[in-house]
Structures are given as C-alpha cells and as structure tokens.
Amino acid sequence: MKLYSTNKQSPEVSFEEAVFKGLPDDNGLYMPKAVPALSAKFFEGLEDMSFQEMALDVTDTLIGDEIGRKDLEKIIYDAMNFPIELHQVEDNIFGLELFHGPTLAFKDFGARFMSRVMGHFLEKKQKEITILVATSGDTGSAVAHGFLGIPGINVVILYPSGKVSEIQEKQLTTIGQNVKALEVDGTFDDCQRMVKQAFLDKELNKVRHFTSANSINIARLIPQSFYYHYAWSMLHSDRKPVFFCTPSGNFGNLCGGLIAKKMGLPIDHFVAATNANHIVPDYLLTEKFQPKPSVKTISNAMDVGNPSNFPRVQALYGGSYDKINRDISGAWYTDAQTSQAMKEVFENEEYLLCPHSAIGYLGAKDYLKSHPGKTGVFLATAHPAKFYDVVDKVLGGKVEIPEVLKETMEKPKKSVKMEASLDALKSFLMN
C-alpha cells in the first residue's frame, strides 16, 4: 500500500511509515495512492458475514501487502471485541449504534485498531514514540483507553478547557499511566493547530518520535469504513437505496464512508450533518471553503471551524466540486433544533439520542422528505450519558449513567493547564 500527501509536496510512503509519521512534511494528509475495489464475491457473501469478517476482508484488501492476514485477523478481533447495533427509530430511518465500546463512542473503532496496528509494527522496532492528539471530546478518551499500557508508546492529549463535557474530561484526565492530558486555554482549533505545529517543528522532532491518533492518521480512518458495510448488509435486501447521514466535525467519519463507496459498496448518498459550525454545508452550496473560528454548541464534538479531513474528501473526488455535490449533501442545525429532536424522538419512540446523534437523525429525516422511497441510516456516535448535562437538561432526568462512567466520575482529575501556543506545548514536550 502506497500513500501520497494531499499537498503533493512529500514523497510517497508505505502504510507503516504513514501510521508512525502521521502527518507529511508538507502539512498535507496521507491518502492511499489507489483505493482497490472489493471483489464481487465479497458483496455476494456480505449478508452471511460477521462484522469482524467484513472488517478483515476490507483491511486485507487495502493493506494486506504490509500485514499478513493472520496478523490482521488478530488485530481486528482484538480491537473490535464489542457489539455494533442497528436500531429502527422510525419508518425507513435507522440509527447505527457505534457506542458499545469501552468509552461509549464511535472513536473506539479507530483508536483500538490503530493502537493494535502500531503495537504490531513496534514489535520489530526498538524505539519509543509519542502519540500527540487534539480532541474536542471523544477522541481523547478513545485514544487514552485504546493505547493504555501499550509498551513503547506515550500519549499526550490536548483538549480545550471548559469546552468538553464533564464526563468526557474525566475519561481522559483520570486514566494515568502512559497518558498525559493537557488542558489548553483555547478552542479545539487551537489544540489542533498546536499539534500540527509540533509535528512540523524540527527541534522537537530531534528529541521525540511523534505520531498522531487524530482522524488525520490514516490508521484511524480505515476502520471507520467498516460499519458502513455492516449497516448496508443489514438493509439492502428490501431493494431500497440506502443512504447515510453522518454527524460531522472533522469529517473523518464521512471519509470512512466515502472510502467504503470507493471500494464498491453501493451507498446511494451521504448527508454531512453538523451544527452551527457549518463550513462544509456552506461549501456544498457555494463551492467556497471558508474556515472560521469555531462556535460553541451543545454538540461540542463537532465544534470545528476548520475541518482537517476535508482535503481527503476533495482528494477522493479529484478535486471535482460537481462530483462531490453529486454524492454528498450538507445540512446543519441549531441547538434549539437539536434539543427539539431529542425531545420528540424520546417522546414518540422512547429512544435516547446524544446531541450529535440527534443532528444525524435530523439530517436523515430531512433528506428522506425530499427523497422518499429510500432507507436512511444515521450514525449514532455516542452514548447519551456521555453528554449527561445536555441530555438530562433537555429530557428532564431520563438518562441512566452506565456503571463504567459512574466509576470514572469518582476518580480525581489530573491535567496540566497550558496556554494555546506552540511554545507552551514545546516546553512541556522537551521537559
């Protein structure tokens, strides 16, 4: 598997090199030079395959030349050792529940896969690496738990002070061991900028071997294509076209679906749904991509003013706006609309949604109004209890906190407060 930089100013690299480097020297993003198609036999047998079997075949098709199938099988079955569920919410609208992993969020798929892939490659190496990652909420806890205790790997997580939920903060600041949490006085965009600057700082890179576990890392992106295959296999037999609505912040989850489509999965359409940080929906209407400072919302994991994975979306379509527009629609919703959807779904269907999943539901419902006769799947990205303060306020005490979260909430928080500058991060990392 060869990968290139979306900025096309860095040499091509192997999958292993891309995983450990994280970010090319030209500040682009690694993408497969070619996205291979899955065989007709794969799609013919999809209905009879387990989720893990699907994931194994997809991964083997993409990177099998660098990791043998037996080793891939071990990685997949160890990383994906939790259930995935498809729940019918309304007629022709399904929620794909991706929150049954250890941190109750979809990012467990990517973080656990990436940690096992790195562990596999590190068995052959004799060096220590530092995972440097920015989080707007769920990435941090998923990465912290995914890499906990893995030999040769230190984890440093940057998160915006006061802009993640209390539960999210506790999940990434109470884990300890090889995981350090940096509480940055700024926004998620500041955290993301600091991480990118550190990756490109020559002095830092002389003393630390960095890689990233954000969705900018290709090893995080690949497993986010798996569950699109699973949902499609469960629904396509009724002969209706299947479309997906993906709640989107950094747009890595959408890229996963686009890769699945590129490999041959006959997904009818994508809806990229987000909150008041509607940079991409605006682009889909105007062809103008204009990053802005992020705005705080109740769906905080999508509070991203400059979606870092968007160049990958463009790369998959050769930069063609018309082709992107043909496959992807944009939608965005206010906090009031999000809260109303959470209320109505609970009252009508007795089904709990986190704010991000509610935005996915709204996007699917609105698209279905103008495109009847299709089946919509929205990605339910996190357990409602992870956003307890928001959901409890909207629904009035209907949220039951899982035992694993109760235990986390009782632990003391340990973080290092930091200003939003490369100098502050550099001082911490050098010392």
Image (cartoon, rainbow, N blue to C red):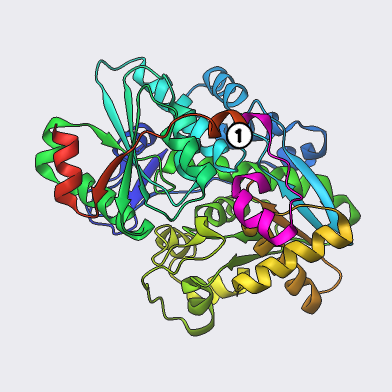
Image coordinates of residue 314 in percent, x first then y, are 45, 65
Image coordinates of residue 141 in percent, x first then y, are 48, 38
Q: Residue furthest left?
A: 203
Asked whether 430 falls inside the magenta stretch, the response is no
Magenta segment, which residues?
383-405
Asked whether 395 falls inside the magenta stretch, the response is yes
Q: Which residue is mark 1?
A: 405
Amino acid carrying label 1: it is: Leu
Image coordinates of residue 203 in percent, x first then y, are 9, 40
In which quadrant of the rendered image does the C terminus lie? top left
Q: Residue furthest bottom?
A: 286
- The residue under the point 74% across, 51% down is 397
Q: Residues within 10 Å of mark 1 (few under 14, many from 20)?
A: some
Q: Secondary structure at mark 1?
A: helix
- The residue under the point 50% across, 79% down is 282
Q: Is residue 18 left or right of residue 372?
A: left
Main secondary structure found in the magenta portion: helix
* Residue nearer the viewer, 362 or 116: 362
Q: Is residue 373 left or right of residue 99?
A: right
Residue 158 in sight from this viewpoint: yes
- The residue under the point 56% across, 57% down is 254
Image coordinates of residue 276 in percent, x first then y, are 52, 72
* Residue nearer the viewer, 35 or 151: 151
Please tell me whether residue 87 is drawn above or below residue 268 in the rendered image: above
